[in-house]
Image (cartoon, helix red, strand yellow):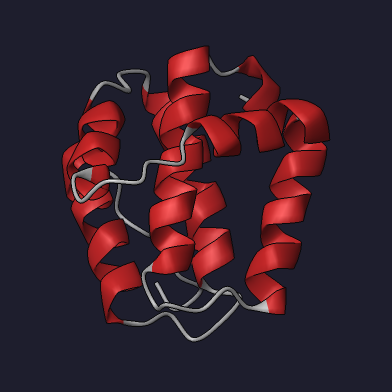
Amino acid sequence: MKLEDMTDGEKHALAGLMRLLVRADNQFSADESAAMHEVANDLGKEEFWGIVEAAMLHDDQQEEQVKASAKDVSRQEAREVIYGSLFTIAIEDAMLGKQSELLEWLGKQWSIEPKTPYR
């Protein structure tokens, strides 16, 4: 499955989760930006940035709302594409506590176990 094959709900979950991930360490590094631009290129820049803008929530319940939308993603292949995209962004920098916590939570919700070259 490719990013462009995802439903609108799956794309919105991806965008919201990406926002949580890159904000988790209170920094948006050049490497994270480059990784997000790769996702934008794969999905289509205009569509991707429109979805990211739509995923901007300005209240204190942002994390809960994003996690609720992530729970609605039911297709395992979409889950794996989203998780892989997030993991790719997270490893561009040193993956810090809150980023790891988000990926760990998501992996448990979606029954995804990260694969590392060491396994």
Instruction: Give the quarter of the image for residue 102.
Output: bottom left
Quadrant for the C terminus in the image: bottom left
**Does residue 72 sit above or below 61 in this rendering?**
above
How many dots with numbers?
0
In the image, residue 20 above or below residue 30: above
Q: Is residue 91 something one can see in this rendering?
A: yes
Q: Residue 108: where, in percent of width, then height?
A: 17, 48
84 with respect to 70 (left or right)? right
- Looking at the picture, tell me which residue is in the foreground, 104 or 29: 29
Residue extending furthest toward the bottom: 94
The residue sitting at 46% across, 41% down in the picture is 56
Q: Can residue 2 be seen in this view?
A: no
Nearest the eye: 107 or 13: 13
Residue drawn where x is 26% and y is 21% of the image: 72
* Image x and y of residue 5, in percent: 63, 16
Toward the front, the furthest residue is: 58
At 61% across and 24% down in the image, what residue appears? Answer: 1
Task: Tell me: residue 69, above or below residue 5.
Answer: below
Residue 57 placed where, x, y %? 37, 41
Q: In this view, does 35 lie to the left or right of 108?
A: right
Q: In percent of the image, x 57 and y 73: which residue is there? A: 28
The spot of residue 55 in percent (x, y) is 46, 35
Asked where in the image residue 96 lies, by quadrant, the reply is bottom left
Q: In this view, does 90 lie to the left or right of 69?
A: right
